[in-house]
Image (cartoon, coloured by chain):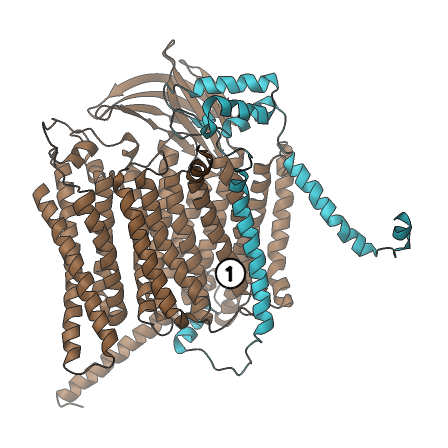
Amino acid sequence: MPLLRSLRPPAPHAARRWSRLPQAALLALLALGSMGAADPAVRYNELGHQMMCVCSCAQVLIECNHVGCPDSDSMLHLLRASVSRGDSDRSILEAFQAKYGPTVLASPLLTPFNKVAWIVPPAVLAFGLVGLVALIRRWRNTHAPAPAHAPQPGAARDRVRRETEL
Amino acid sequence: MPTFGSYALLLALALSGYTLLAGALALRQLAAAGPLGPAEAPRIDRIAETARRAGIASFFAVTGAAFALIWTAFTNDFTVSYILHHSNRALPGAYKFAALWSGQEGSLLLWAWLLAGYGLVLRLRHRVDVRLTAYASTILAGIQLFFLLLLNFAAPPFALVSGTIPADGFGLNPLLQYPEMVIHPPMLYLGYVGFAVPFAFALGALMMRYPGEKWIHITRRWTMVTWLFLTCGIFLGAHWAYSVLGWGGYWGWDPVENASLMPWLTGTAFLHSVMMQEKRGMMKKWNVWLIFATFLLTLLGTDLTRSGLVSSVHAFAQSSIGAWFPGFMLVVLAVCLFTFIRQSDHLQSEHHIEAMVSREASFLFNNWILLVACFTVLWGTLFPMISEYVQGNKVTVGAPWYNRIAVPMGILLMLLTGVGPLLAWRSASLRSLRRNLVNPCIVAGAVALAVVILGARANLYPWSDLGTFYSFLVWVLAAFVVTAILSEFLRGASVIARHTGQNLAASALQLTRRNTRRYGGYIIHFGVAVLFIGLAGSAFNQSQEQELGFHDRMRIGPYTLVCQSYTQDSNPNYDTEYALLDVFRGGRRITQMAPEKRFYAASQQPATMVANHSTLAWDLYVVYAGKNPDTGQPIIKVFLNPLVAWIWIGVLIVVAGTAVALTPNLSATLAASRARKATSLVSDREAVVAAGGR
């Protein structure tokens, strides 16, 4: 294989530069994925926003503001203890889930079924955009642009055009 | 009065039933008869006219019922179960009025009342297009009939209390006792219900194979006004949540909030894509389904929040009537599908998109993203139910999920908001594209640099975390959008200035008046950009909680809060605890704030009254979180929320832009005034001739 590689003509400078784009994009993605500082206060705040108070107020744990809420104080205490112990985010979330049930998490964990929740909307968006591009290309190829002397549309549409264009 | 109200509802039901049946009969005979003979036409006209008049009368009947309910609230008539559960003697007058929409039965009555009001306007303006209006009126009567059936048989607002009548009512939900609640629900309902009108016109136009796109012209104002009401309703709700719920935010992706957002998203898509139908005869099927979907989503939203399928912090009314809605939605869907399949040959596109880089293509992408955003919101709202069905246990789909999935879609939309208006119809040349994009790109680049430099001073970088990264993108794109809009105004204004010698501001004003729809649209886009700038600030929210005794102080950002006193008070409606806090900035006292916690006597429920000091840079948002039972001292929670004021300013700009877009063009106004003048001259001349003069 190295021999084959050595026989390949050297890629032009521009092409080499473009070939680095995916690598750069991957690096950027990795950087984005690894965002989130290890500072305990930041982690406490972030994890507190990833869980719900279980007092049935339907509020994010760290934002629960009920007078005399029976749950949020003890939950926040437990969270603070887990963060200062250095437990990982995943293990803290799983521990809370085990103790309070799956509704304690403000967004579903990535279990095989819950992945559906995360994947479906971006997939619909991406497939739709690709489909639209393909559709427009097909329209463009199958329908020649109207000739300049094509019959003009109705008076109503003409009026709309006058009203909405300079 | 309850008896009067019940009979009024029964009368309204009969009148709506007649409007539907007689209207359908007249339209069926009209469609079946073909060219009418001189004997048949007046007979059918008479039936159609009686249907129209019955529709008008139904408004007065529903108004009578609504008046009866308000009257019972004001007279503290606790024999009526609804009033017993949603009012009390000490409730201030404005909130007694608001009791009309604070529960299940009342809010359904409000639906029916507003629908009857829209129907009244539509039927009074029937000369715009008599036949199309007859179709729309009949369809509206069908919708009205459903709500009146609910009110008469499933959720009667005048049901009487059995047994002993309590001396006082149980009171209004404390969360609803806030000035905005007098206006927010009617606004939201005006938006929800209003979409029934363009839906009825679209379905009617399809049923009668209405030629051309005139029905869109007729319904454009209806749709825009409805969209404006819904927009105002949503943001008044956000402002209410911000001011009353006391958790420091304005949007929690709650199912009730989601229910209002979904029809707004499809309605926005419709407002954009009808332009393609108007201008180029494209996307007819798509548009018809967009307005069908918008109306169905208003029903789904009502169902979601009333059936108890999803839990919400502010689903104030839940009962078994949820079972009625899926049935009605199925009927509506079946009618829509049947009509669409029968008449789909009438909806053939006259043109297709000719280039990827064109205004039409940008509308198509914008529509797709709006639709997927709507689907995402629906998916997130329903996923807990799907999970329960499949896995046997519910999961929560809350703000973190929406922030990760929906925010990127919002950013994509923002990009299209900037790029779309710069593209020409049919096909944009590379040269024009470069010319139009260069200034926005330069300004966006400069803003990106400025944000990075300013952020670095606070040790914040776009890559610090995902929220910061999204905010950075939003600000850069907002700069792009605003510059693109300003360039468009400048380009047009400078042409007028060259020809007229006016200054640029006067020219820009004239430009807007000449083409209100286009430039009103740009103003709306500008408002959206401002709104997004404010939303992006939420990534930098700070909060702090502290127990404060006399003269204790706490610091957040540039502010220092000093507790001057804390005490309690009471009035017939509620007891209150509050703290008086002096706020200092840079050593100077700038204001005094008094966050309070109320405890309502009738409902035995607490409520928060937030104190907020708002500036363009940030809101100092102070909550009285409670009292330490050991020390008796107040616990104060303070939030520093950046750029929130920009959200409300953005909404005001959107409202102004919509008002501009609804105003007739200057040339059209002049033409109308010239026509009026000509008519009056002709009339004068005719009068002179008739009088025998010259």
Residue drawn where x is 48% and y is 23% of the image: B544
The relative height of residue B352 versus residue B539 in the rendered view (above or below) is below
Q: Check disc 1 and report the residue beneath it.
A: B364
Quadrant, the C terminus of chain B: bottom left
Please state the horizontal and vertical placement of residue A103, each as a whole percent of the image.
Answer: 45, 30
Left or right of A128: which side holds B651?
left
The relative height of residue B74 versus residue B434 in the rendered view (above or below) is above
Left or right of B609: which side holds B161?
left
Q: Is residue B222 visible?
A: no
Residue B154 or residue B175, whichever sits in front: B154
The relative height of residue B53 versus residue B212 in the rendered view (above or below) is above
Residue A137 or residue B573, whichever sits in front: A137
Amino acid type of the residue that numbered disc 1 sits on in the rendered structure: Leu
Q: Is residue B569 visible?
A: yes
Chain shown in brown: B
Please state the horizontal and vertical placement of residue B563, each as a whole percent of the image.
Answer: 40, 18
Please state the horizontal and vertical placement of residue B314, each as a whole percent of the image.
Answer: 33, 35
Q: Quadrant of residue B611?
A: top left
Left or right of B240: which side holds B380?
right
Q: Colour of chain A?
A: cyan
Circle 1 residues within 10 Å: few <14, some 14–19, many ≥20: many
Residue B655 or residue B189, whichever sits in front: B189
The relative height of residue B643 versus residue A8 in the rendered view (above or below) is above
